[in-house]
Image (cartoon, rainbow, N blue to C red):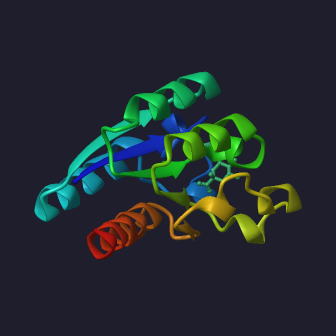
Amino acid sequence: MHLLLLNGPNLNLLGQREPEIYGSMTLKDIESQLQAKSIEEGIELECFQSNFEGALVERIHEAMGQVQGILINAGAFTHTSIALRDALLSADIPYVEIHLSNTHSRESFRRHSYLVDRAIGIVSGFGGVSYLLALDGMVSHLRNSH
Ligand code: CA2
């Protein structure tokens, strides 16, 4: 099984600012934790972060036919990007939406997601643990549907 972890804008700053909202783990910490779990499960995991919408769209295009599942924290693009939605849907790769914070307990504009209605599921509000739960959910989805 080959999975792709995508992180969107500003998530490269994790651990450096606003720890009360986003926790104190860096993106590298989160990626290492997920890599360790993937190795245990015999899964190949690639990680990619970008602050650019087009770069994320292109990474999704490259994943077509190569990866079986995408774990995505699209950051603020979650709430704005029809382009990311279109890329995910045209790639036809199952995906799980991830958020560190509980997007429903914050400003009302964070309650809308362009991705969630076509996601396998969403994990929101558990800090770095959201990513581990999303990996578990994706693996169980793929193992039970193949
Ligand atoms: O809770 C999440 O994971 C979010 O996707 C994070 C996005 C936010 O726009 C979404 O509504 C919810 C923001 C990521 C900003 O990341 C930072 C990390 C450290 C310091 C400052 C920003």
Q: Nearer the viewer, residue 36 or 15?
A: 36
Front-most of residues 7 and 70: 70
Q: Does 69 appear above or below 125?
A: above
Most foreground residue, 32 or 25: 32
**In the displayed image of the protein, which residue is found farthest to the right?**
108
Identity of the residue drawn at 57% across and 56% down = 22
Q: Quadrant of residue 83?
A: top right
Residue 129, position as x, y percentages in the image: 42, 67
Spot occupied by residue 75 in the image (x, y as percentages of width and height) = 63, 45
User: Is 53 left, or right, of 56 in this rendering?
Assistant: right
User: Image quadrant for the C terminus?
Assistant: bottom left
The one nearer the camera, 62 or 49, is 62
Q: Is residue 73 left or right of residue 84?
A: left
Q: Residue at x 50, y 48 (%)?
A: 92
Residue 121 lies, in percent from the top left, at 54, 69
Residue 35 located left or right of residue 72: left
Residue name at image x 13 percent, y 55 percent: 39
Q: Relative to residue 30, is residue 87 depicted above or below?
A: above
- For the point 54% across and 31% down, the residue is 56
